[in-house]
Amino acid sequence: MTAATYQYVDLPDASVVTTRALLTARENIADTVAARAMMCIHGGAGFGKTLAVNTCLRELEPSEDVRRVTFRARPTARAVRYELFTALDLAGEPPRHPSEFDRLLKTALAERPRTFLVDEAQWLNGEAFEYFRYLWDEPATRFAVVFVGGEGCHTVLRREPMLSSRIFIWQHFTRLTPSEVLDVIPLFHPIWAHADPDDIAFADQHAAHGNFRAWAQLTPTPAPPWHAPAAPASTKSCCAGPSAASPDTPPPVPLAPPLPPVTVVLDRHDDALYTHTALAAHHLPAGRITLHPGPGTTSETGLAHDLLAALGKPPLLPGRFPGGRQPAWEAATAWMTALPVTRLTVLRAHRLTARRAMRLLRLHALTGIHLTLVCHRPHLPAALHQALRTADYSVTTDFEAARRHYYGTPITEPPPADKPAGPADRWLTLPALDRLVSYDSPRPCADPCMPPPIAFRHRPPPVVLTARTAQQVAHRLHAATAHPRLAVAVATALFTGASLQQLATARPRDYDDTAATLALHDRARYTDGCAAYPVPPWAGVFLRAAACFTRLVSGEDQELLAAPGDRAHLLRVAETAKLRPPQPPAARRGGPVGRVEWDWRERQEAERYEAVPISRIRASRH
């Protein structure tokens, strides 16, 4: 982790400056870690607390096992248990009962010494602090805790004698003095290195006021015009694949259309009419969604989960991800691009933190949606005002204007949603899935490959889904998972009849959105060799979402569809959607009643092979 990632405001070329507070924090943290004690670093926003603590803890790694925890607003003891479970990377599912949970955490904390950095600790209440004290008082546990937060953190800890008596060191971060500003700011960024001291003093007196974050905002940086990242010869954009027939000829990249300005609606008196109208405008088939964030949460991932729920998806993505971070924002961006969504209205925007607001602005830049932020206050809050400094935006207080932004122009009332015929709790038996767990082992092509259209020679083509069945399948897959790769893998198996191993050979460059084809590879010709499959219209949205998601998360050289290691998650998604291959008769079932048997076709082929006389097998070999 670089120093820049510790800063609240990401400022290129900024340097970590050694201040008197940072030197003091370095000594205090070293003493606290050595004593396996607890300390509290508190002060106003932007005074450099988080940057200083992360810099000091970075110097202790890797010899010291440092775990960083940031809680949501006002967490309970139950929330603290779950966050610690995640921070410790404990295996399995979290226990349901508090007593079992406490025993598990105590055992883990007794294994080896650790240090916990608890950032934004001003959100912790007495109950949350008490749970840390409860674990720290256990004789077998060996860990240090550094609480970092605003003045509310200091107030809560001081209020409870049982808590304050256990704090080993208190450190208060304050503003930089005028003399410190003149010493520190020229070293903070090259733009101030040769500035006149009088100019620095004037800027501090009238704008920065000794606040590091304010200095970062004051520091001008050139903002290059946004443009699509340079794509290799086999790509066209972030979310659309190239033509498999011409991998060496890059098509012309059209200029990105200008972004629509962000609209801020000021609901001065928190009128319920504004909220109810925005919620009524939500209609996903028309490309309009209304995001109503859940109260009591401040994390960026939590907002992405709310956004996935607004898109009709389960909020959590199954599987393991690098760094333990779910790519929820990438998944939301991919689905919004593929569906497509053209308008996003965010209610309770006055409660957005600056980081959450920046996430929404980044989503706006990537997707080009019309973003409307509804603040139920007479004025813009400071956090939102700070985030909007980098965006083109307009403010309105008129209800009719707000309604036009909710619905678009002209205003259209949402038609009744198309519901697929048939109950969703009944299984759909689809013969195309009987090869999903086949044991063939195709491999992706290392060199550029221009496969011909599929010609089914060694296996029958999959049965084309009827319009009614395709509608049911698409509806169920959309509701079964938020993971684009898992959803598209099941969809692709239905129109290709391919196994999971062959699905894993596809890369983003193998999908051509314009020609509606997908290339799958099979160098060893286990089936019908490398071939391009036509993509039916109902499956196109899944492939567009997966292509966009893959490029946002990992790039061109990773699997477009699910990887072989995702088999368990893939089958779970199919079963959640109530999709299965033909099942054996009850008399021939190999497992308990009710369990889906995915390898029934493979078992049938093995039995037929064993029934062939040996003489015929030898004759066929000669």
Image: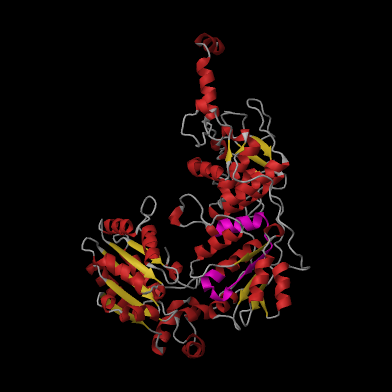
Q: Is residue 556 left or right of residue 176?
A: right
Q: Quadrant of residue 72?
A: bottom left
Rendered view: 182 above or below 101? below
- Queried whether the magenta region covers residue 471, the answer comes back as no
Which residue is at a point 73% across and 76% down the rendered structure image?
A: 401
Which residue is at a point 28% across and 57% down the rendered structure image?
A: 103
The x, y position of residue 329, in whole percent, is: 55, 60
Rendered view: 190 above or below 527? below
Query: Which of 132 and 25 lies nearest the eye of the viewer?
Result: 132
Query: Which of 423 and 488 lies nearest the eye of the viewer?
Result: 423
Q: For residue 171, say whether it is visible.
A: yes
Which residue is at a point 64% across and 58% down the rendered structure image?
A: 336
Rendered view: 386 above or below 585? below
Query: How are the residues colored?
Result: secondary structure
- Quadrant, the N terminus: bottom left
* Residue stretch in magenta: 329-357
The x, y position of residue 413, in whole percent, is: 75, 64
